[in-house]
Image (cartoon, rainbow, N blue to C red):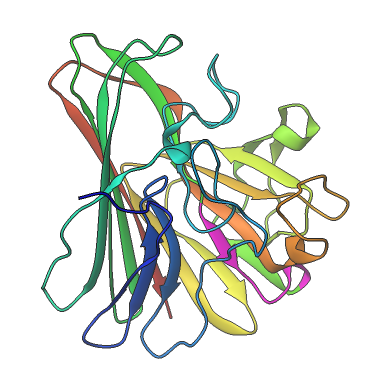
Amino acid sequence: MTHDPCQPHDVVADDGARLQGCAHGGHLTGWWPAGESRSRLWMSSTSTCGPGAAIRGGVPVVFPQFGVLGPLPKHGFARRVAWEPQHPSTTGEATLTFATTIPARGDWPHQATLTLSASARAQMLTVRLAVANTGSTPFAFTAALHTYLRVSSTSDAGISGLEGCAAEDAAAGGRATTLPEERLSIVGPLDLMIRDVPGALVLHDAAQPDLVISTEGFRDRVVWNPGAGHALSDVPTGDEASFVCIEPAVLEPTPIAPGHAWQASLIMTAR
């Protein structure tokens, strides 16, 4: 049976927590904790969906290359292809699962199966990315869950948990920097790559409960906001102040042998 990969899939948990996603890119597009009326994920009102397009907002899957850390197109190609929706769970949670097989191509002569599964209950969201090497050759990858988080205003929000961390400032050509010993301001332009983050981060926003962001398997974090005056056609003027990307990532090439798999999780809790 054929399906429209851009058709929204909407599921609601027994306690009212809600998830929304679409099969194009295996993309999570909305998360409403139980009792909250507004999605915690920001989505662009002008984003497009379809073959070759990358949806702006939500949780894009970055694979097999983060950014320009390699020879492939920026952020790889998994977010630009159709995935297959899997049967939802009946556990009382809101669950969505999408999977795709990435075939060998000229600039990436390997084969992998990717599975993205998300589950929401109460105030918690868990998103798991699994990568299986289904080909006959080993490969190494970098990856991320490029999570767009809604804020009331970047000028009134900030991140704790990165105080004093060493970072690479991609907005300044990759210059090494040390983050301040205080909450990190998220007013852009901001493009920080932080390796080996030891614990959870907290997104503070006076207009909504704090969001605790932790991971399993993702060693690194990226914090990004394009800032005012950006040239992104699918971020309407002024909307850059309504989100920040806090991305669990693997920034160092991670090898997978044929027949082996890797997985990692993002866990977010509103409190």
Please identify the quarter of the rendering in which residue 260 is found. Answer: top left
| Residue at 35% over, 77% down | 18
Q: Quadrant of the C terminus?
A: bottom left
Asked if residue 27 lies left or right of residue 50, the reply is left
Number of marks present in the image shown: 0
Furthest residue toward right = 229
Q: Position of residue 106 (x, y in %)?
A: 43, 9
Front position in the image: 51 or 104: 51
Furthest residue toward front = 1
Front position in the image: 56 or 146: 56
Q: Position of residue 183 (x, y in %)?
A: 66, 63
Q: Position of residue 83 (x, y in %)?
A: 32, 43
Front position in the image: 179 or 66: 66
Q: Is residue 69 magenta?
A: no
Specify start and end residues of the magenta stretch as a single range.
147-155
| Residue at 70% over, 68% down | 242
Q: Is residue 21 visible?
A: yes
Looking at the image, residue 251 lies above or below residue 60: above
Asked if residue 105 lies left or right of residue 114, the reply is right
Q: Is residue 196 visible?
A: no
| Residue at 11% over, 74% down | 91
Q: Position of residue 15 (x, y in %)?
A: 25, 88
| Residue at 35% over, 51% down | 23
Asked if residue 98 lies left or right of residue 62, the reply is left
Looking at the image, residue 102 lies above or below residue 144: above
